[in-house]
Amino acid sequence: MSKRILIARFLNRYLNYLWSKSAEQNNRLLISMINRANSAKVLDIGCDSGKLIIERVQNIRKPQIYGIDIRSEAVSSSKKLGIKTKKGNVERGLPFPSNFFDIVSANQIIEHLVNVDRFASEIYRVLKPNGYLILSTENLSSWHNIFALILGWQAFSQHISQIKNIGNPFRLSDWENIPACFTHVKIFTPKGLKDLFKMHNFQIIDFFGASYYPFPSLFSTFLAKIDPVHSPFIGIKAKKLK
């Protein structure tokens, strides 16, 4: 095996390690964004198994958790944990009443959507007045994406084909026949993300970055606080304006 292939494999494994640690750091930040409360109605968009949203609402003494996911297995798994989950495609709307939720959570969802305006307006509709959204996504202006673009490669955070993950020799996965719901369609910069939700009558309360490539956990946490604009994950806490 050539030295070039060995180096490529090492870098790929290291980037995957960084990604998993970054996802953990991102979830901890989302937990910190949820206000302490005695009770609250919470919607998790793209709830998956439901385990993460249960962890995320630990600051709420008696949460009422609702979920929506496009995959039947996710709906089934989350219902077993007591989450009131519906199956649905969020691009077609949220099947819940207006002014119903105190909190909406959307972790790593918006990058999979085509109609992000519909997504933002539906979140606004289902939130109560002064209710808030916590949302995170991958960051187009992360240093690893900038580096890839300078070299003429596809950004790490975006997929251009469902047949195979192409365009970047150090891509984090070698998926083939990627399901449509897993492809990354729109990748935001910090300004783009904030501007979208401001346009849909949200007030940005907080903005954060999680992790900082290519540095390991402890140092990356520190750097992300100083320079969140170039973190691999970015997020907002945004309040619905009347």
Image (cartoon, grey):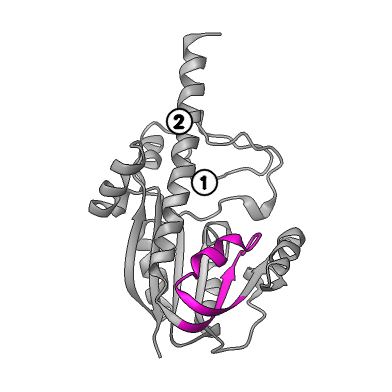
Q: Secondary structure at mark 2?
A: helix
10 Å neighbourhood of mark 1: few (<14), some, or many (≥20)? Answer: many
10 Å neighbourhood of mark 2: few (<14), some, or many (≥20)? Answer: some
**Place of residue 2 in the rendered image (x, y in percent of width and height, measured from the top left):** 52, 8
Q: Residue at x 50, y 84 (%)?
A: 39
Q: Which residue is mark 1?
A: 158
Q: From the viewer's perspective, is 157 left or right of 235?
A: right
Q: Is residue 235 magenta?
A: no
Q: From the viewer's perspective, is 56 left or right of 176?
A: left
Q: Amino acid at mark 1?
A: Gln
Identify whether 170 is placed above or below 51.
Answer: above
The boundaries of the magenta stretch are 38-65
Q: From the viewer's perspective, is 55 left or right of 69?
A: left
Question: Which mark, by number, is residue 177?
Answer: none
**Place of residue 60 in the rendered image (x, y in percent of width and height, measured from the top left):** 48, 76
Q: From the viewer's perspective, is 34 left or right of 179?
A: left
Residue in front for this viewpoint, 49 or 144: 49
Q: Is residue 49 magenta?
A: yes
Q: Earlier in the sequence, mark 1 or mark 2?
A: 2
Identify whether 94 is placed above or below 100.
Answer: above
Q: Which residue is mark 2?
A: 14
The answer to whether one can see residue 168 in this image is yes
